[in-house]
Amino acid sequence: MKKPVLYIVIPCYNEQEVLPITSGMFLQKLRDLAAAGKVSEESRVLFVNDGSKDDTWRIIRQLAEQDEHFLGVSLSRNRGHQNALLGGLMAAKERCDVTISIDCDGQDDINAMDEMIDAYLDGCEIVYGVRSRRDTDTFFKRFTAEGFYHLMNWLGAQIVFNHADYRLMSSRALNEFANFKEVNIFLRGMVPMVGFKSTSVYYERAERIAGESHYPLKKMLALAFDGITSLSVKPIRLITGLGVVVSVLSFIGVLWALIAALAGHTVAGWASTVCMVCFMGGVQLLCLGVIGEYIGKIYMETKHRPRYILSEKTWDKDE
Ligand code: UDP
Ligand code: MG
């Protein structure tokens, strides 16, 4: 079999402190993988500059001049981690057989790439890098992040627990992924929708080598909110559920008001007012839920996601 061409795709935003350190590590990993005969000599490290305001793009251009194994693309402005990564993967997919996406701050263990490539050579089209431990995270980050994964799964988005954006994707998987045309993207929730043979590789996540995280709590919450609303219409269903609960409660409320009125414990007009308020509350929430169901359907339709992806055909004999 021909050795696969690997592109390591790395989004970078204001990373002038880490880039000079980690670029060498990525290059060395690429060389080791090629020396071990696992990937082709044509493999490359592709940096995506996400509209950085510092020297990041200048550093990337310098690296590309110094060594042909380094390539770079630059976004016209800052579009956020997910878009930058997608841009890089789409630029890479025509030029390679397989990609590995990774952050540029050295937090994700590059040695897991060996195992990822092994899984790819074994027929996997997608390999998820999963953090085995979160010791280096603060209690707060661990608590919020793990809670987020549970919440996402509960809401019906099947994301891989403790997997971020360190993953291998074959160009085949990427070509299918390119048919997901939605604008609000949350890659780790969307990639599993592609299907195909996939597996997980475990690694330990380290501290950032230098520089600062670009994911303060505010951005993390925004990412979580984006992830939930772009993958799941369950929040709308919750409204319907709430409508049912409120309707039942208001029914009880109506009975109570009637009984109290008949028993003569109330002032005139109280029972009818309470009945109206309870009734309207229940009906309105239920109606909102029904309208929401339709909006949810429209929302999913507007994404124009592929309805299915074929993985094999019996009449395809070229493999
Ligand atoms: N990043 C990006 N655009 C942004 C923010 C971040 O491309 O607007 C990149 C960043 O350079 C890094 C990766 O996304 O390679 C993850 O960011 P960071 O390490 O700050 O997040 P954390 O690891 O703290 O969650
Ligand atoms: Mg990081």
Image: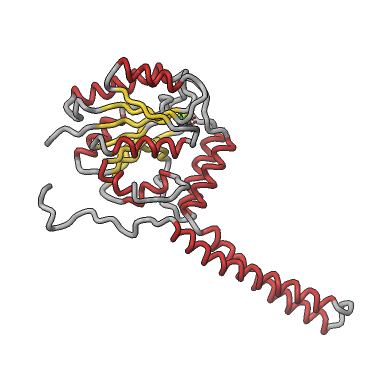
Question: Is the image coloured rainbow, by chain, by secondary structure, or in one colour?
Answer: secondary structure
Closest to the observer, 142 or 280: 280
In the rendered image, residue 10, in percent from the top left (x then y), is placed at 38, 30
Above/below status of 47 relative to 282: above
Q: Is residue 65 left or right of residue 106?
A: left
Splitting the image into 4 quarters, where does residue 61 fall? top left
Name the residue nearer the viewer: 187 or 66. Answer: 66
In the image, is residue 67 above or below residue 234? above
Report the residue at 12% width, 47% height from top: 319
Q: Residue at image x 26%, y 41%?
A: 171
Q: Residue 294: percent from the left, percent from the top?
A: 52, 66
| Residue farthest to the bottom, as pictured | 262
**Looking at this rendering, what residue extends furthest in the top direction?**
66
The image shows residue 204 at horizontal and vertical percentages of: 39, 30
Q: Nearer the viewer, residue 47 or 114?
A: 47
Left or right of 267: which side holds 94?
Answer: left
Query: To which quarter of the image does residue 125 belong?
Result: top left
| Residue in the foreground of this view, choosing between 272 and 89 | 89
Residue that extends furthest to the front in the rendered view of this protein: 76
Q: Mark yes or no: residue 173 visible.
A: yes
Q: Is residue 203 left or right of residue 98?
A: right
Q: Residue at x 46, y 48 (%)?
A: 183
* Residue 195 on image: x %, y %: 30, 51
